[in-house]
Image: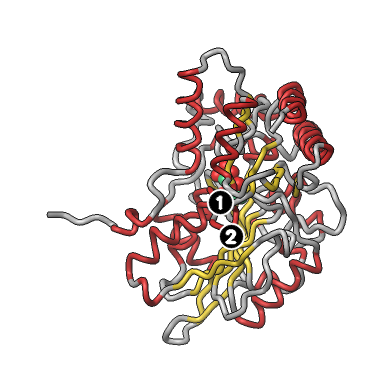
Amino acid sequence: MFSINENYLKLNESYLFSTIESKVNGFTRNHPQADIIRLGIGDVTLPLPPSVIAALHKAVDEMADKSTFHGYGPEQGYAFLRETIAKNDFIDRGLDIAADEIFISDGAKSDTGNIGDILGDANVIGITDPVYPVYLDTNIMRILQSSITSSKILFLTCSEENKFLPELPPKRVDVIYLCYPNNPSGTVMTRAQLKKWVDYALENESLILFDAAYEAYITEDDIPHSIFEIEGAKSCAIEFRSFSKNAGFTGLRCSYTVVPKALKTVTSTKKEVSLNALWRRRQSTKFNGTAYIIQRAAEAVYSPEGRKEVRSMVDYYMQNAAIIREGLAEKGWTVFGGVNAPYIWLKCPDTTDSWAFFDRLLQECHIVGTPGVGFGLKGEGYFRLTAFNSHEKTLEAVQRIKNWKQ
Ligand code: PLP
């Protein structure tokens, strides 16, 4: 008989949000009148900005005309988008990143999940706990496959004691996943804090996989928007960005990954290799590019109008974040995040069982959130609420929580 990749059997049986969905569906079946407010999944709710919609329409029309039709595009993305990104997100901010270091993709989820394709199995991988589950699950899918003994995952604890920011690993790690602003804890690293990680990586010849999907939500100074703001990062880091959370592309799908040409390692035979070249090879073999119309839509995000529209969407969600953060703090709950991120991470009041808290919040307040344990064992006892609902629903949810007699 044929065999399967049995690593998949080592994963949690169902993806976190499917479990939440089935619990919510069960509840609504029994309580069809309940007005459920969803502050669970990190999906945006505002429609796409007008400039993006206009660019989509225009690109669709181009596809209808033989002279402007686009078939397969370059696997790493069209030059018009890569150049626009390089200029706006990096060069204009004083960072030396070129268009050929940028790879357009259909999501930071795909890229953070697929990046392991170009990494060796023997690497020791540092992953924060709690964490965006994709980093861990894709490593379980991949690494255990060859030899569980030759590969290790080192969990970097994030807890109230360290303000949900990991300490440098107690032993050497080869690859480190960092995500700031953080999902789920909503925390950020200052320049000085991120510099410690870059220095660690340079000293240990390690690789940092930096997920900056929430960069647009940074409101405070001294918080880096890109790891490449830190000196030396081009020799030790790959950065993942997404149009999902800033411009509402969760349904359109567009993101990009920066793999600097300065990022190199050596093979077992001491041959120098460029990760930029490896990732290009991987993408051109396994990916046929993001749709032309979607790349034109992403380009529109950088137009003067697009920028304003995106800013006001992010501001809208950040007002929700403030409503949740301040409302829960007034109730006396311990809250983290929500200042530079659309996530509020709270300590479950009166329980250390985050699924029990999920059930009570659903049954008694009709509010859906995400249990911290879904992001890792160290997330147990905590709970994530998102700022992605409307002002009205967010205000209503906070009022329900304030009135809640626990
Ligand atoms: N990275 C983090 C930390 C996320 O929280 C998410 C989505 O919630 C993603 C990546 C996925 O982004 P995309 O929609 O670009 O796949």
Determine whether the beta carbon of the residue marked 1 sits less than 8 angstroms from the nearest atom of ligand 1. no
Left or right: residue 148 compared with residue 368: left
**Residue 360 placement: quadrant:** top right
Residue sitting at 80 percent across and 37 percent down?
A: 331
**Residue 172 placement: quadrant:** bottom right
Residue indicated by mark 1: 375
Residue sitting at 47 percent across and 18 percent down?
A: 30
Q: Is residue 283 depicted above or below 28 in this figure?
A: below
| Residue 309's disc number | none
Residue 210 at x, y percent in the picture? 63, 60
Whether residue 102 is visible: no
- Amino acid at pointer 1: Phe
Q: Secondary structure at mark 2?
A: strand
Residue 392 at x, y percent in the picture? 75, 21
- Number of numbered discs visible in the structure rendering: 2
Whether residue 195 is visible: yes
**Residue 368 placement: quadrant:** top right
Residue 322 at x, y percent in the picture? 81, 37
For the residue pair 316 and 185, the one nearer the viewer reads as 185
Residue indicated by mark 2: 129
Q: Is residue 289 depicted above or below 193 in this figure?
A: above
Q: Residues within 10 Å of mark 1 (few under 14, many from 20)?
A: many
Q: CA distance from mark 2 to mark 1?
A: 7 Å
Left or right: residue 206 compared with residue 20: right
Residue 317 at x, y percent in the picture? 75, 34
Disc 2 vs disc 1: Cβ atoms closer than 8 Å?
Answer: yes
- Amino acid at pointer 2: Asp
Instruction: Tell me the quadrant of the picture where the N terminus can be found.
Output: bottom left
For the residue pair 341 and 337, the one nearer the viewer reads as 337
For the residue pair 273 and 44, the one nearer the viewer reads as 44
